[in-house]
């Protein structure tokens, strides 16, 4: 459980040797072999996401919005309406479009330009996921499995090859989680070193001072996530809860008396400071709107006869913009042929068709080319059993890792259930993207439980055989996911197929068409 060693009653018997072992575990990111595995899998992911990125030609699905906004931002500093020759009204923050604009600046206003940043973001997500998994499981095999499963997921692949905002949101949410895990390590590492130096946690001044560099970094990356989409805010209370619980557990393990009250003021204070950085970074993503003086609602108060002081007026105008955008999102209930509900997402009940072309010569009487936002079925249909296993083992083993992974899943899914039931808002399957890394970690956690059963006096003799069987089962599972991905790959990248071959891949019939 990554506990700080103690005797259970507040003492610290045998701490130096135990500290050495725990510090070695916390510093496991230094293993060079783990970085070789990381580089290999990230290289495979990059090839899958970058090769043929310029195809198909033209805008697909919501690329009609974001790349055009990004190009206008390069020209005007804000989104622009060419019909009115004035600022355009948009309902998402600007950072995702600025990232798309970087690709357009580098490669031009073309398919490669506007899709390249998404491919890089998707590849970076896999890099971060591997490193997070290695920290959680202390296993190169399980870390590589996590990265490989995301690499071979069609849902992630399609969003990595399409110029939408969600891949950037997913990257920054995962980076925030990674920073929080590092903050947990940093806090516990400082306690371990203090105990090794003879610090007495039971004394009236038993607390130690730990400046949370990684917690502040998490505030910054979370501000970037909010600068892409406001739905990032769903994760805020859940991540804050993780921070508090982890710190209280660390103090309890170290033997601090009253671990909740002793230090909670500092915990909450640093969380507030981290959120202040979130707000500052979020405002920074609106720099173009502030400095160009031409953004939508930029001078709303002045235009409506209200006082508009130089700085406060701009902030009040931005607040009005946010109010109007929130009103738009709250009332968005128009029917769409590819909309779906949260309870359908993990079952692949209604994927989204990004691109369709029934023309072309493939050597058959009729042909079809499609890009379908579909998760690799074998992987996605294992999410629910993996979550059940996560819950079971998490409770049975009192494992903080299961709690952390489950918290990410709940934060990424539960709010959408609320909105679906409360106001029937129009939703799409790609909203689940920020929860995807945690769902994959749940699968890897379950595989790890199969591969490394707990030891015990009665279990010890059979441990090796069970490990072997579990490893074979996990290996066969990953192989089947890879074969499933290869089978569906043509409809992830828009490859022209004979119509019968395309139809054979529509496993759920009209629900996938």
Image (cartoon, helix red, strand yellow):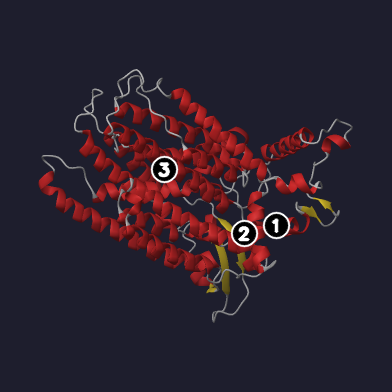
The image shows residue 42 at horizontal and vertical percentages of 43, 62
Please identify, in this view, whether the residue under mark 1 or under mark 3 is nearer the observer: 3
**Residue 418 appears in the picture as rendered:** no
| Quadrant where the N terminus is found in the figure | top left
The image shows residue 20 at horizontal and vertical percentages of 25, 41
Label 2 packing within 10 angstroms: few (<14), some (14-19), many (20+): many
Label 1 packing within 10 angstroms: few (<14), some (14-19), many (20+): many
Q: Circle 1 sits in a helix, a strand or a loop, which is it?
A: helix
Residue indicated by mark 1:
70
Q: Circle 2 sits in a helix, a strand or a loop, which is it?
A: loop
Please state if 268 lies on the left or on the right of 55 as rendered. Answer: left
Seen in the picture, residue 363 relative to 437 is either above or below; the reply is: below
Question: Which is nearer the eye, 192 or 150?
Answer: 192
Question: Which is nearer the eye, 474 or 73?
Answer: 73
Seen in the picture, residue 326 relative to 228 is either above or below; the reply is: above
Question: Which is nearer the eye, 19 or 250?
Answer: 19
Name which of mark 2 and mark 1 comes first in the sequence: 1
Label 3 packing within 10 angstroms: few (<14), some (14-19), many (20+): many
Residue indicated by mark 3:
182
**Residue 412 appears in the picture as rendered:** yes
Do residues under tags 2 and 1 come within 8 Å of each other at their CB atoms? yes
Please state if 487 lies on the left or on the right of 495 as rendered. Answer: left
Mark 2 to mark 1 CA distance (whole Å) = 10 Å
């Amino acid at each position: 459980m990554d506990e700080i060693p103690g005797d259970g009653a507040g003492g610290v018997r045998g701490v130096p040797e135990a500290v050495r072992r725990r510090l070695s575990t916390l510093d496991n990111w230094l293993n060079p072999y783990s970085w070789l595995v990381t580089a290999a899998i990230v290289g495979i992911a990059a090839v899958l996401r970058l090769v043929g990125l310029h195809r198909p030609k033209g805008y697909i699905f919501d690329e009609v919005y974001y790349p055009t906004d990004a190009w206008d931002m390069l020209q005007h500093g804000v989104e622009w309406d060419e019909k009115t020759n004035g600022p355009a009204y948009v309902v998402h923050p600007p950072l995702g479009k600025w990232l798309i604009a970087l690709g357009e600046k580098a490669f031009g206003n073309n398919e490669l330009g506007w899709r390249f940043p998404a491919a890089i973001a998707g590849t970076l997500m896999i890099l971060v996921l591997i490193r997070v998994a290695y920290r959680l499981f202390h296993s190169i095999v399980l870390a590589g499995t996590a990265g490989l499963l995301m690499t071979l997921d069609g849902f992630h692949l399609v969003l990595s090859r399409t110029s939408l905002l969600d891949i950037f949101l997913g990257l920054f949410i995962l980076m925030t989680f990674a920073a929080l895990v590092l903050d947990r390590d940093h806090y516990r590492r400082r306690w371990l070193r203090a105990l090794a130096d003879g610090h007495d946690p039971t004394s009236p001044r038993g607390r130690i001072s730990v400046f949370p560099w990684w917690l502040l970094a998490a505030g910054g990356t979370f501000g970037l996530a909010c600068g892409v989409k406001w739905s990032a805010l769903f994760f805020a209370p859940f991540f804050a809860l993780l921070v508090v619980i982890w710190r209280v557990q660390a103090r309890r393990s170290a033997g601090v008396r009253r671990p909740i009250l002793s230090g909670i003021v500092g915990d909450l204070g640093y969380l507030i400071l981290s959120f202040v950085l979130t707000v500052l970074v979020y405002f920074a993503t609106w720099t173009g709107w502030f400095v160009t003086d031409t953004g939508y609602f930029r001078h709303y108060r002045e235009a409506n006869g209200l006082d508009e002081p130089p700085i406060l007026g701009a902030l009040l105008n931005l607040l009005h913009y946010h109010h109007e955008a929130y009103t738009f999102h709250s009332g968005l209930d128009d029917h769409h042929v590819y909309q779906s509900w949260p309870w359908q997402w993990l079952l692949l009940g209604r994927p989204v068709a990004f691109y369709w072309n029934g023309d072309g010569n493939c050597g058959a009487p009729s042909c079809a080319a499609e890009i379908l936002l579909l998760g690799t079925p074998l992987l996605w249909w294992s999410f629910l059993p993996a979550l059940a296993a996560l819950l079971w083992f998490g409770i049975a083993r009192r494992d903080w890792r299961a709690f952390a992974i489950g918290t990410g899943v709940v934060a990424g899914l539960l709010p959408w259930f609320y909105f679906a039931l409360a106001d029937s808002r129009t939703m799409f399957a790609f909203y689940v993207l920020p929860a995807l890394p945690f769902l994959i970690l749940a699968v890897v956690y379950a595989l790890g439980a199969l591969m490394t059963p707990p030891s015990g006096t009665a279990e010890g003799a059979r441990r090796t055989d069970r490990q072997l069987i579990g490893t074979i089962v996990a290996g066969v599972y990953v192989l089947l996911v890879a074969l499933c991905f290869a089978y569906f790959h043509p409809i992830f990248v828009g490859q022209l197929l004979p119509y019968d071959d395309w139809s054979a891949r529509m496993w759920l019939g009209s629900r996938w068409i």
